[in-house]
Image (cartoon, rainbow, N blue to C red):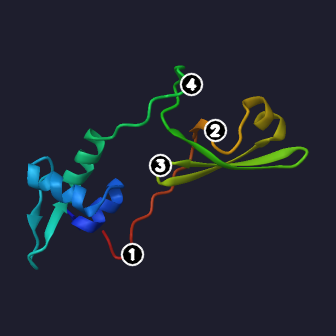
Amino acid sequence: MPSLRIKDAAGLLGVSDDTVRRWIDSGALAASKDTSGRMVVDGKVLAEFAVAHASPPPNPLGSGTSARNRLVGLVTKVTTDTVMAEVQMQCGPFTVVSLMSSASVRELGLEPGSVAVAMVKATTVIVETPEGSS
């Protein structure tokens, strides 16, 4: 099982190194020392912790849907022409870009600072791993 250094675990969880250390010190997250004496977190343990502590922002739409890949965020940029528009959103640490009609942007009232939900439906999801990992 892969082990992750505190810095890397923090980056994956989107928190500071100190936050991960506090979780370890409080017993909320299990860690051990590697052969070099550095604190590490088992990859499987970190994955379970991430799932257990995931708390997406509340749905501002207040509606139900079958979509599971919902990213709540802020609209950061809208570029339109007469027919098409590009809408950029910041959803946590991730930037999401959507191409839609300019009419849709107007109908939805999308502008920088708007809260919106990006729903992603994909039949293909590509997964990569760092070079050299197995």
Asked if the residue under mark 4 is in contact with the one under mark 3, i.e. CB atoms within 8 Å, the reply is: no
Q: Earlier in the sequence, mark 3 or mark 2?
A: 3
Circle 4/circle 1 CB separation < 8 Å: no
Disc 2: which residue: 114
Instruction: Name the residue carrying label 3.
Output: 92
Q: Which residue lies under the disc numbered 4?
A: 61
- CA gap, disc 3 and disc 1: 26 Å
In front: label 1 or label 2: 2
Nearest to viewer (mark 3 / mark 1) = 3
| Structural crowding at the residue carrying mark 3, measured as other residues with C-alpha within 10 Å and reported as few (<14), some (14–19) or many (≥20) | few
Q: Position of residue 28 (x, y in %)?
A: 14, 46
**Of helix, strand and loop, which one carries label 3?**
loop
| Cα–Cα span, label 1 and label 2 | 39 Å
Q: Amino acid at mark 1?
A: Glu
Q: Residue at x 13, y 68 (%)?
A: 39
Q: CA distance from mark 3 to mark 2?
A: 14 Å
Q: Is residue 17 above or below residue 53?
A: below
Q: Which residue is mark 1?
A: 131
Residue 125, image x and y in percent?
A: 52, 51
Q: Residue at x 32, y 56 (%)?
A: 15
Q: Earlier in the sequence, mark 4 or mark 1?
A: 4
Q: Quadrant of residue 40?
A: bottom left
Q: CA distance from mark 3 to mark 4?
A: 18 Å
